[in-house]
Image (cartoon, rainbow, N blue to C red):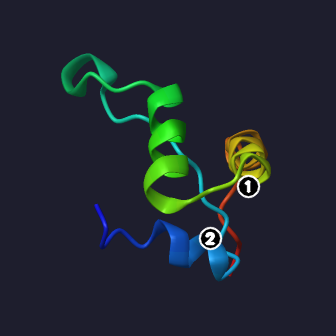
Amino acid sequence: LQAHPVRRLYDAGVPIILNTDDPGIFGVTLCGEFELAAREFGFSEAELQEIAANGFRFAFSEPPRT
């Protein structure tokens, strides 16, 4: 987990989104993922609010056209 690039990506300005992957199998919750991000990667409450907003901001976005 320490090698995960999420903090570096966020600090570089890459919009990130936290989510769960099959909570029924892995036993994880979205709240738990946010708690993990705060504890393991040092995200502040304000940063976590921005990350949560990204989930709504990018949920229905379309890929860039080339």
Q: Residue at x 62, y 70 (%)?
A: 10
Residue 64 % position (x, y): 70, 71
Q: In which quarter of the image is the C terminus?
A: bottom right
Asked if the residue at tag 1 contacts the one at tag 2, i.e. Cβ–Cβ closer than 8 Å, the answer is: yes
* Residue type, mark 1 in image: Glu
For label 1, the residue is: 47
- In three-dimensional space, the C-alpha distance between marks 2 and 1, rounded to whole angstroms, equals 9 Å
* Residue 26 sits in quarter: top left
Element at label 1? helix
Residue 20 image point, x, y percent: 41, 34
User: Does residue 41 sit above or below 14 in this rendering?
Assistant: above
**Given the image, on which type of amino acid does mark 2 rest?**
Tyr
User: Where on the picture, by quarter, is residue 9?
Assistant: bottom right
Residue 19 spot, x, y in % from top left: 49, 39
Q: Quadrant of residue 14?
A: bottom right
- Relative to the observer, which residue lies in front, 33 or 18? 33
Give the farthest residue toward the top: 24
Circle on res. 10: 2
Callout 2 secondary element: helix
x and y percent of residue 18 in the render?
53, 45
Tell me if 28 is positioned left or right of 46 in this view.
left
Q: In this view, does 38 lie to the left or right of 46?
A: left
Q: Nearer the viewer, residue 26 or 60?
A: 26
